[in-house]
Amino acid sequence: MYRYDEFDAKFVAERVEQFRGQVARRLSGELTEDQFKPLRLMNGLYLQLHAYMLRIAVPYGTLSSRQMRKLAHIARRYDKGFGHFTTRTNLQFNWIKLVDVPDILAELASVEMHCIQTSGNCIRNVTADQFAGATPEEIEDPRPLSEIIRQWSSLHPEFVFLARKFKIAVGATPHDRAALQFHDMAVDIVKNEQGRVGYKVIAGGGMGRTPYIAHVMSEFVEREDILAYLEAVLRVYNQDSRRDNIHKQRIKILINAIGPEEMRRRVAREFDEIKRTGSLQLPQAELDRIAAYFAPPAFEALPDAMPLLDSKNGGDRAFENWKKTNVHKHRAPGYAIATISLKAIGQVPGDASADQMDAIADLMDKYSVGEIRVSHEQNLVLPHVKQKDLPAIFARLQAIDLATPNAGLITDIIACPGLDYCDLANARSIPVAQRIAKKFADLDRQHDIGELKIKISGCINACGHHHAGHIGILGVDKKGVEFYQLQLGGSGAEDASIGDIMGPGFGEHEIAGAVERVVNVYLKERKTGERFLDTYRRIGMAKFKEAAYEQVPA
Amino acid sequence: MTKLLKSGAFAADPFVSVADDAVLPDGDIIVSLARFQKERESLLARNAPLGVRLQSSQSPELLGDDVNRLSLVVLEFPKFRDGRAFSWARMLRTRLGFTGEIRAVGDFLFDQVNYQHRVGFDAWEVPDNFTIAQFQKALGEISNVYQPSADGRKTIRDLRASR
């Protein structure tokens, strides 16, 4: 993991004191709420329906056990004993007092954490593949570049008052687990024809009320030029984006208005100039220095315990089920990647209690070199566990209610906080997620259905990624009543697509039934090996739509 | 009322802002981009320092090669959320090589002064109650920087390398 040196530590400590001053100016009335708002947002502090919400950055989703314990402590001392992992791999506390925030930031700084740029119209916390450094699929670990981007973007003087927020993700595998194509900008680590590693840069993806898949900006940027290229994209965006309509100020709107070709031309011009001045070149030595922090742990020479991974081992059915969905292949023989689902049936997706966080920290220390990852699907991942330890890990997870064997299945639902917390929401998301999860609680049925990603947003801002759900659900407000629209056929993976809207919404008590009827159409129509998404893409909307509405009174 | 802060101290403002339809006075003047484009030759022929005021939607590139015949470029912040002028200042200093005064006017916050300073602003039109101590505090709150900008400061990477 990356460790702060004296410069990083001083930077974060000074930022805490700067924010302490800003809070004091707000509390004394020197700053109006309107003036304070962009300042607090740049530090992850939102004013929600009931209280302040503080969003803590988890850069590229990587946490140490020491950091996890600190989060548990903050949850207990300053919040109501739990936290919420988000689709941006951050952690939110929903019941924070303004006066406590500077002290919380100081506590975070003591474990090399902060809230810098987790909200506001600036470059947000960078995200990456949650299997980084552990999966055999990747070209290289995406986290060193993510850390370099984190440093470059921290209080970047030119880009802290952008037209809108700006989200960057980094991936390095053919199988995209980080929803790259739905980001304002993403870097895909690739190899060119000569076998040289470099970066493919895409931009202009996004969800919200106007969903777009990203366009390719450059197929191959050389290593040393990557910061120059990213800065060029940001500069064109900052200069040329609209500023007259908040709904049309994301980079996706600019790129689709002027066209990707024109965008590439403008970026290329800036890029050439930045390269010429040379000040943003990334020397190989710097890349190597950062990469050394992420060097793989010393894996023991272990045999692959293949029975553990592939067969019914000893007949513990609960363990076998968990293994089937929550355990993935590791780069080192004898090791595995284990996903801890935060989607227990009937619970709030992404929530973890302080006690669970402490228990997870113990598991991290005992079994996974003290490290964990947060995924954009709101689960946690133990990246480096020995296959022979899996039964013990599973037993411990069972004891703390975190052994739900549903990673990637229909009950592994992404949901935004919705109207239970958020003052932007039109409808509640959490109860709908809970209702659907309960309907499909039967594990055999979940396994029969296979990979099916349900994503729920409580408003058009799409924090729950509904556009990218195999089944997406959007909460809307119709004359004071919550309704839920269905979208089918979205994907946030390498086969990215935006879901098609089915038609009028369903009532709060109808939506889970409608989802079930849609799933039944899939079970009836599927061909061997087809996922829900594949069947939908083959047969289209009609049959699903007919079934969904058949039991709804007109 | 406002006052001018330049090069770290309060200073008398030698420039007079002239409306588009007003008669030009003698001495140092600031005109809008529209007036500059319309009366370019006569304005450049005057024997006194000239400044041009740009709205946040107007790129300094609209000044063309004339930019380096100006003594002052005024960049407007119509509201503090509009951050385009951060890039315009950077462009003036880095691409266009402008060495004259870049002045921030309009609605900006104390908390933005440091960023403005980094991208190349060297003059600010500030409220009358603004103090030099506040200015110095704004510049000094964060000691080190991660990224190069128009101020030419050593970055944290440079500092690491010279340890």
Image (cartoon, rainbow, N blue to C red):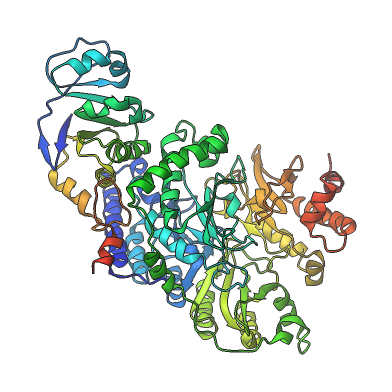
Left or right? Give the position of A534 relative to A111.
Answer: right
Q: Position of residue A266 (x, y in %)?
A: 47, 37
Q: Is residue B141 above or below residue B2?
A: below
Q: Going 75% across and 45% down the picture, which residue do you hit?
A: A506
Tell me if residue A432 can be seen. no
Tell me if residue A477 can be seen. yes
Q: Position of residue A352 (x, y in %)?
A: 55, 69
Q: Is residue B131 above or below residue A258?
A: below
Left or right? Give the position of A209 relative to A552.
Answer: left
Left or right? Give the position of A546 relative to A419.
Answer: right
Task: Name the quarter where the C terminus of chain A is drawn.
Answer: top right
Q: Position of residue A213 (x, y in %)?
A: 62, 46
Residue at the extreme front of the image, as rendered? A194
Q: Is residue B148 above or below residue A479?
A: below
Relative to the observer, which residue lies in front, A248 or A157?
A157
Task: Name the quarter where the N terminus of chain A is drawn.
Answer: bottom left
Q: Quadrant of residue A114?
A: bottom left
Left or right? Give the position of A70 relative to A26.
Answer: right
Q: Going 19% across and 33% down the picture, which residue do you hit?
A: B100
